[in-house]
Amino acid sequence: MTSSNKDSFGAYLKTERELRQISLEEIAVTTKIKLEYLRALEEDRFEVLPNETFIRGYIRAYSKFCGLNEDDVLVNYEFFDQLRTNTSPDQIATPVQDDATPNNRAWIIGLLLLGTIALSFLLAYLFNQFSPP
């Protein structure tokens, strides 16, 4: 983040959008998010927006349209949200990026293991069905 957008999540979004020469209207038309809501995001007027689930969805769609990493932008949102809600500085979690995704690896390994077991049972069944008596 640059020094011009350290104080506000909305300023951060607006700066990133303007760097890419994208209008709010373009985002609104493509994402089907009301222009009023997009302006509210950029102006940090979260009270105008429906609820947290919608806010996160709007941020994801906005980020994706602008070519930003959606997860990084959400981390920044959470950081600014903590600042906005007057959390004491020692309680604020600094955004940290962890490129390693052990949970995804565990799922992949688990699925591969499950697939191997299923294939073993299928092969044993087929062997028993087609082997001579």
Image (cartoon, helix red, strand yellow):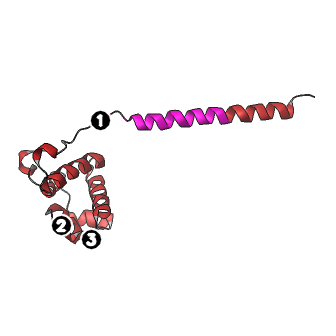
**Which numbered disc, 1 or 3, marks the residue that appears first in the sequence?**
3
Q: Is residue 100 magenta?
A: yes
Q: Which residue is mark 1?
A: 98
Dominant secondary structure of the residues highlighted in magenta in the image: helix
Q: Position of residue 69 (x, y in %)?
A: 28, 46
- Quadrant of residue 117 within the rendered picture: top right
Question: Residue type at mark 1?
Answer: Asp
Label 1: few (<14), some (14–19) or many (≥20) C-alpha neighbours in 10 Å: few
Question: Residue type at mark 2?
Answer: Ala
Q: Is residue 96 magenta?
A: no
Above-or-below relation of 40 to 109:
below
**Which numbered disc, 3 or 2, marks the residue that appears first in the sequence?**
3
Q: Position of residue 8 (x, y in %)?
A: 11, 55
Mark 3 or mark 2, whichever is nearer to me: 2
Image quarter in which the N terminus is found? top left
Mark 3 vs mark 2, CA separation in Å: 10 Å
User: Is residue 39 found left or right of 55 in the rendered image?
Assistant: left
**Which numbered disc, 1 or 2, marks the residue that appears first in the sequence?**
2
- Quadrant of residue 53 within the rendered picture: bottom left
Helix, strand or loop for disc 1: loop
The magenta stretch is 98-118
Say if residue 108 shows up in the picture.
yes
